[in-house]
Amino acid sequence: MSLGQNEQVSRRDFLKLSASGVLGLALSRLGVDGALARESSYRLVHGVEVYGLDEKIDTLEKAKNLTFEFDLDFERKLPKDIKSKNRWEQREYAMPKDKRLFQFVVNESIYHEYSKQKAKTGVDFVEYIQIHLDLMNRFSKQQPGLENFRTELKRVIVVSDDFKRNPVEYSKDIDAMWFNVKDERYEEKAWNYYQWQAERQESGDLILTTEEDRAMDSYKESVVLPKADDLLQSISDRGVGVNWALIHELSHHWNLPDERGLLLDPI
């Protein structure tokens, strides 16, 4: 099996090359290390692929290889005439127009700290991220023209604490990426306006309430949200906390045209 100058290697062909003994030559032409002979393992956590729990991602090489695997899987699903096109043309063809797919990268100790604190906070890391995306979807649903627009959690990648900056490169199958190097829920702030508590009422409505703002003489504010079929609705009887600042920052990654005026602040 040989590779032409413009040919792509599918995941299936990748494994065939590995078995045939010519993997090293093929990968050397692509500039990729031969350590990719097998797929990285992941665990499904609340239906989301989480990488780095069983096979630690503690080197830049492992992080690069993981992105390469994602790109191989993305390209494997493309028709031949699209595979020869550049990255952006491939994405324009394959990526959904009414969704934004987010990838979260998090240090190992932070990921596990969320699990340790779940009895108190009501959520582990995957759930914590999902309830924020749920809120984004609730608000986009109320925007004219964006009723069917959704934000989805593509995957979570757990990396070594040695990484203080995100070691994972953008793969072709995501729209945005966020790196969690700390648990912002316990940061000491002069005020806590962006930290809210979500609680479900008997009617099914959710009430989001700010924590007391020490800089504004104990000012508090509430927002009522109608019942919806999402994770936030199902777990909010635990009084889970949400970070409005995170939602605000993530909304910048929607990459919508400037004329889309979105009201994401609770005012």
Image (cartoon, grey):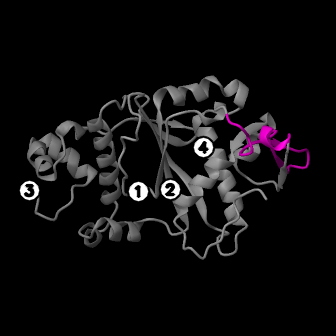
Q: Residue at x 11, y 52 (%)?
A: 29
Quarter of the N terminus within the rendering: bottom left
4 or 3: tag closer to the N-terminus: 3
Q: Quadrant of residue 35?
A: top left
Q: Residue at x 41, y 34 (%)?
A: 164
Quarter of the C terminus within the rendering: bottom right
Say the numbered circle drawn on residue 129: 4
Q: Which residue is mark 2?
A: 101
Q: Are marks 1 and 2 in contact (CB under 8 Å)?
A: yes
* Mark 2, secondary structure of its residue: strand
Marks 4 and 2 sit apart, C-alpha to C-alpha, by 13 Å
Q: Are marks 4 and 1 in contact (CB under 8 Å)?
A: no
Marks 4 and 3 sit apart, C-alpha to C-alpha, by 44 Å
Say the numbered circle drawn on residue 173: 1
Q: Residues within 10 Å of mark 4 (few under 14, many from 20)?
A: some
Q: Quadrant of residue 172?
A: bottom left
* Mark 1, secondary structure of its residue: loop
Amino acid type, residue under disc 4 in the picture: Ile
Q: Nearer the viewer, residue 120 or 16?
A: 120
* For residue 25, side relative to residue 256 (left or right): left
In the image, is residue 133 part of the stretch drawn in magenta? no
Q: Is residue 208 above or below residue 143?
A: above
